[in-house]
Structures are given as structure tokens and as C-alpha cells.
Amino acid sequence: MFKGTLSVLVGFVIWFVAATLGNLLLRALIPTYIAVEPVMAFTVPMLLARLAVGFFHRSSQVLLAHMSQGHRSNRFTFSR
């Protein structure tokens, strides 16, 4: 039970860090991203960059699910 609870907490922290770093990276690499983010008027390259951030974010969840392989409920939570 402790390992399952810890996996959920670590998963949340990894999710938060990955999403925050991805957003900060987009802001640093695409100068106009900061201006269009409040109104969500993204260009195609910006949308593709957001999709890539989502992919890497999802990959971190899958990695965590693989690391906590002993608990079926954790695999279900993080692999969907």
C-alpha cells in the first residue's frame, strides 16, 4: 500500500515538473509564444511544439508506470 501511495505522489510531482518545464521551454524557444498564449491563438509550429511537449509528458508517465510495475492499480492509472 505504501509503494502504491508513493507512486501516485511521485507521479503527480513528475507530471507537474514535466508540464512546467515544457511550458517554460516553449516560452524560451518561441519568442511570440508568450504573446499568443493568453488568447490561445497559436500558429501551426506552436501547436506542433505543444503536441511534442504532451508526448514527452506522456512518456514520463509511462516510464513511471513501468517503474511501479508491481501494482496493477498504478499501471492502470498511469498508462491510460
Image (cartoon, rainbow, N blue to C red):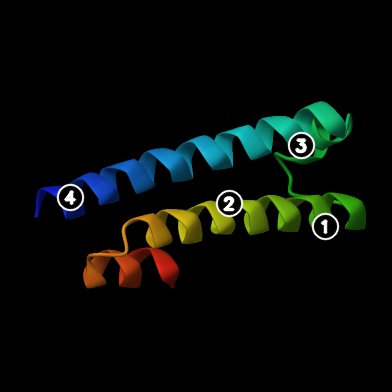
x and y percentages locating residue 30 in the rendered image: 87, 34
| Up/down of 30 relative to 65, above or below | above
Q: Earlier in the sequence, mark 2 or mark 3?
A: 3
x and y percentages locating residue 75 in the rendered image: 33, 68
Viewer-nearest of discs 4 and 1: 4
Spot the residue most to the left: 1
In whole angstroms, how far apart are the C-alphas of marks 4 and 3?
Answer: 34 Å
Q: Which mark is residue 26?
A: 3
Q: Badge 2 is on which residue?
A: 57
Q: Which mark is residue 48?
A: 1
Task: Tell which of 46 and 68 is nearer to you.
Answer: 68
Instruction: Identify the image quadrant of the C terminus.
Output: bottom left
Residue type at numbered disc 2: His
Instruction: Identify the image quadrant of the N terminus.
Output: bottom left
Task: Tell which of 79 and 46 is nearer to you.
Answer: 79
Q: Earlier in the sequence, mark 4 or mark 2?
A: 4
In whole angstroms, how far apart are the C-alphas of marks 2 and 1?
Answer: 14 Å
